[in-house]
Image (tube, rainbow, N blue to C red):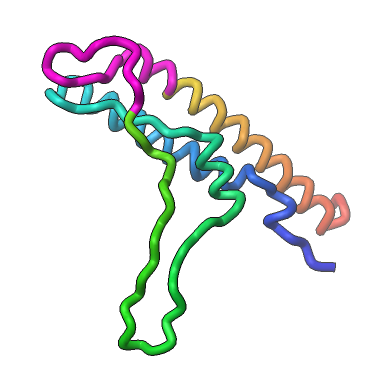
Amino acid sequence: MAINLDKAFGLHADGLVLRSKRAEVIASNIANADTPGYKAKGMDFQKALAQASQRQSMGMTRTNEKHFDVRMELNNGVEFRVPDQPDTGDGNTVDVQVERNLYLENSLEYQSSFQFLNGRIKGLKKAITGGQ
């Protein structure tokens, strides 16, 4: 009997990738907190996870190697964030306190997803080895 890893891990594997990407976006916001004109970006995690679960991709089949490889990626979920406060006067919309809280929240969610996946892997390993 074959083990389907996609079924065993569910959306948590995609969730880890998306949380990692979200951490990059938030870290970029924090790094650019003093950059004039920088607009804070955010990621709609639920929307990105829904896209990842559907594995949406668009492209055309190449029937000849001389054809261009035309592929389109759907929105990766990164968009400009609607600021809670007016900009700082130089066009920057990053609120460092908000970004730090979002980063902390994201890292906690990442850790919980990671622990869940780790438990799944241990369970599969136990099933394969017969508990030895």
Quadrant of the image occupied by residue 79: top left
| Pick the front one: 4 or 85 | 85
Q: Is residue 92 left or right of residue 15?
A: left
Q: Eyeballing the image, is 24 above or below 2?
A: above
- Residue drawn 60% across the image and 53% down it: 54
- Residue 113: x percent and y percent? 61, 35
| Pick the front one: 129 or 61 | 61
Part of the protein shown in magenta? 81-102
Q: Quadrant of the N terminus?
A: bottom right
- Residue 58: x percent and y percent? 46, 63
Q: Is residue 51 left or right of residue 28?
A: right
| Pick the front one: 28 or 121 | 28
Whether residue 91 appears in magenta in the rendering, the answer is yes
| Pick the front one: 83 or 10 | 83
- Residue drawn 41% across the image and 57% down it: 73
Q: Is residue 128 left or right of residue 119?
A: right
Assign the magenta stretch its main secondary structure: loop
In the picture as drawn, the residue positioned furthest to the right comes out as 130
- Residue 17: x percent and y percent? 50, 45
Q: Eyeballing the image, is 86 above or below 127?
A: above
